[in-house]
Image (spheres, rainbow, N blue to C red):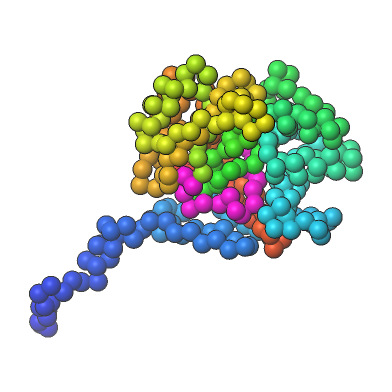
């Protein structure tokens, strides 16, 4: 029999080195972002947890003078409206700059295709957009089952979790999203992040509780700041008469998962809701300045990042 050679002292096998690499964090997610792609590699994650990515074609008619991130927003919005809104639908209309493009596209399709739809707003801004574009206006009292809700995101992770509420509309946005059969996020590629936490997490609070809530959020590791109004003295007041505390938790990787953090925040007395949207979006459309659009579909067993 062939004698097995003894390994010199201090030299490890390839297998042992691989194990050491894994224990040292070699399986952690890496993210690659370019102007036309958003991809991540999750070697330690099962295929069933990975969001499916595909390229879709968006109508760029009339967008020759629209460039940069704004072009990405327009293309993402058009792709989402064209792929998900059908005749007879009740449509949730989100808030923010990207949604402006979605409402324009809805109005174009209603005029061109004679679509019969009803639009349920998530904010005063959304309501004004719907009225301005002469779209049928609905509400949750009469249309409590929404077919599709299209909304923007301030930050979007590979798991299709998001931070929203930069415009102060997070509560109504979450209510409409929760009551929708399909929740679709739209964004330009500047909103993509390897993990959530680059943006502050907005927390809507009852005014009388903002000080104790701030202390509780700081105990969770956050740096808090009461959002102030820009055109009046004093704090920003939401459409619901509440205050917003913006909380910087830093990158959430290696800390609490977004789901755990959301649960802890929402368990604080005085908190109405927070801007973490976890495991809610089924699809996301991300527009790139070069004219490409990436469509992401949530996995059956979504990851928590």
Q: How many marks?
A: 0
Q: Which is more toward the observer, 18 or 250?
A: 250
Residue 290 appears in which quarter of the rendering? bottom right
Residue at screen point 52% across, 51% down? 193
Q: In the picture shown, does residue 233 fall above or below 195?
A: above
Q: From the viewer's perspective, tell me whether residue 172 is left or right of residue 117.
A: left
Q: Which is more toward the observer, 117 or 212?
A: 212
User: What x and y, as percent, mark residue 210?
Assistant: 47, 22
Quadrant occupied by the N terminus: bottom left
Q: Residue furthest front?
A: 233
User: What x and y, as percent, mark residue 141?
Assistant: 70, 17
Q: Is residue 105 magenta?
A: no
Q: From the viewer's perspective, tell me whether residue 272 is left or right of residue 183.
A: left
Residue 242 appears in which quarter of the rendering? top right
Instruction: Tell me the magenta residue range.
Output: 179-198
Q: Residue furthest bottom?
A: 2
Specify whether residue 179 is in view: no
Specify whether residue 157 is in view: yes
Residue at screen point 65% across, 27% down? 232
Residue at screen point 78% across, 30% down? 128
Q: From the viewer's perspective, tell me whether residue 91 is left or right of residue 282.
A: right
User: What x and y, as percent, mark residue 204?
Assistant: 53, 26
Q: In the picture shown, does residue 59 fall above or below 234?
A: below
Q: From the viewer's perspective, tell me whether residue 1 is left or right of residue 271.
A: left
């Amino acid at each position: 029999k062939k004698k097995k050679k003894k390994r010199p002292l201090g030299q490890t096998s390839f297998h042992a080195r691989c194990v050491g690499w894994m224990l040292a964090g070699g399986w952690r997610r890496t993210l690659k972002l370019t102007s036309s792609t958003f991809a991540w590699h999750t070697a330690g994650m099962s295929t069933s947890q990975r969001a499916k990515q595909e390229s879709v074609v968006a109508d760029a008619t009339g967008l020759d003078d629209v460039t940069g991130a704004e072009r990405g927003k327009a293309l993402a919005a058009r792709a989402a409206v064209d792929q998900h809104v059908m005749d007879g639908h009740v449509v949730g209309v989100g808030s923010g700059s990207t949604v402006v493009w979605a409402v324009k596209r809805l109005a174009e399709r209603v005029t061109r295709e004679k679509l019969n739809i009803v639009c349920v707003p998530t904010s005063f801004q959304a309501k004004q957009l719907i009225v301005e574009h002469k779209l049928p206006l609905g509400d949750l009292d009469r249309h409590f089952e929404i077919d599709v809700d299209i909304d923007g995101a301030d930050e979007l992770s590979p798991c299709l979790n998001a931070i929203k509420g930069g415009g102060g509309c997070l509560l109504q946005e979450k209510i409409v999203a929760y009551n929708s059969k399909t929740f679709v996020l739209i964004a330009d590629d500047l909103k993509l992040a390897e993990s959530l936490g680059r943006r502050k997490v907005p927390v809507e609070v009852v005014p009388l509780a903002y000080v104790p809530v701030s202390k509780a959020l700081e105990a969770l590791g956050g740096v808090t700041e009461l959002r102030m109004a820009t055109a009046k003295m004093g704090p920003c007041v939401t459409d619901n008469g509440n205050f917003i505390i913006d909380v910087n938790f830093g990158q959430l990787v290696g800390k609490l998962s977004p789901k755990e953090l959301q649960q802890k925040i929402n368990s604080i007395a005085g908190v109405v809701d927070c801007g973490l949207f976890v495991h809610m979006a089924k699809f996301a459309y991300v527009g790139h300045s070069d004219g490409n659009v990436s469509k992401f579909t949530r996995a059956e067993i979504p990851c928590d990042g």
